[in-house]
Amino acid sequence: MPRFGFAPIALFCLLAFAGRAAHASTPGHAPGDKDLRKAEAVLSKLLRLEEADAAHDSEAFGAAFKKLYPGLFVAVAELRDDDLKTELATAASLYDSARRARDGSAGHPDCSDELRLSYFRLCRESADSAGLLRAKATLHTRRARALLGYARGQRDAETLDALAEIRAERSTDLALTEEALRALKELTTEAADTAFSADEEGASPAGVGGRVAAARAQTAKQSSEGQTPDRLSASLEEVGRLLAALPRTRVRQLLANARDAFRDGLFWQLKSLPSRALVVSADSLADPDPLRRLDLDAGDASRAALQNLRAAQRFISRAEAAVEDSKRGPDFGE
C-alpha cells in the first residue's frame, strides 16, 4: 500500500486553512445553554489537568488524573455530538494516553509518524512521547475553549482564528478518514482473496481437504506475488498511523474496530499456516502445531479468520455510511 506521507497532508492543511480563515462562523446548530454548561464542566476538569501539567508537578497531575478518570469519559459521552464534543473527547483521550505513557517507557517521539501539521509542530517541540500527548491534549482543550467562547458570544480575533483552524482540521479529518477507509478496504479485499472458503456449518472431510488444497495453492500464489503476512502487518501499521491522527469520534471508533477485527483475522490465518504447510519442518516435533495446543484444527482457524474478516467489512460499511451522513450534516465530527 502506498505510504500516506506527511507532505500531502501538511499541504492540504495549509490550503484548507487559507480557504476558510476569512469565513469563520459558528459550526453547526448552536447548542443550548444546558449543553454548554455540561461542556463547560468538562472543560474545567481538563483545565485542572492542564494546570497540573504546566506546573511540572507529576504528583499533582497524578492526583488530578485519578480524581477525574474514568468519570471524565462518562461526562464527555453525554455531550451533544458536534465539534465541541470532538475536541473535548480528543483532549480527554490524549490525557489518558499521556498518563499511561508517563507510567511506562516513553522515549523521544518519532515525528515522521505525525500526519498533521499541527501535531508535527508539537512533536518537534516535545522531549518525549508523554509530553507530546499532553501537548496535543492542551491543543484540543484550547480549541474547545474557543468553541465555548464563540457560543457565549465572543468574537475577538483569537477566537475567530481558532474557529478557522478547527474548520481546516475537520477537512483534514475527512481526508485522513477516507485514506484509512481505502486502506482497510484494500486489506479486506486482499484477505478475502487468500482466506479459506470455509462453509458456515459443518463440512465433510472431502470438503475440508478441498479447502486445504485451495489454501495451499493460494499460499503459493501469495508468496509469488509478495503478499506476505509481513506486508499485511506493515499495512496495518499504516492504518494505525492514520487512526492516531484522527480525533476521537464515532467514525474513528468504527475504523478502529475494523482494524482490530482484521488484525484478529490475520492472527487466525497465521495460526493455521503450520497445518497448511507443503513442507513439514524437521523441528515440527519439538515445535508442534499451535492449534493442537488449543484443541483446534486448520478449519477452525480459517472459520475464525473469515468471521473476523466479515466483521471488519461490516465496520467499514458502517464507517462509510457515517462519513456520508456527516457530509450532509453540519459537522464532520458528528
Image (cartoon, rainbow, N blue to C red):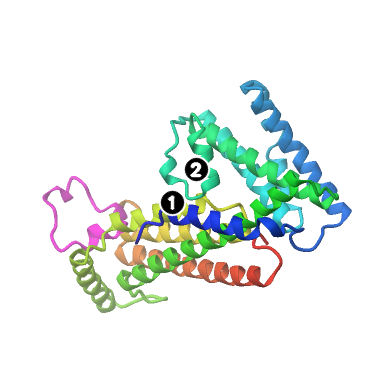
Q: Residue at x 59, y 52 (%)?
A: 247
Q: Residue at x 81, y 49 (%)?
A: 155
Residue 273 falls inside the magenta stretch: yes
Quarter holding residue 268: bottom left
Q: Give the residues in magenta.
A: 270-292
Task: Kindly tell me whether residue 295 is visible in this rendering.
Answer: no
Q: Looking at the picture, tell me which residue is in the foreground, 257 or 49.
A: 49
Name the amino acid type tagged 2.
Answer: Phe
Q: Residue 61 vs residue 242: left or right?
A: right
Q: Are marks 1 and 2 in contact (CB under 8 Å)?
A: yes
Residue 310 falls inside the magenta stretch: no
Name the amino acid type tagged 1.
Answer: Phe
Q: Position of residue 86 (x, y in %)?
A: 67, 53
**Numbered label attached to residue 6:** 1
Q: Looking at the picture, tell me which residue is in the foreground, 196 or 204.
A: 196
Location of the N terminus by quadrant is bottom left
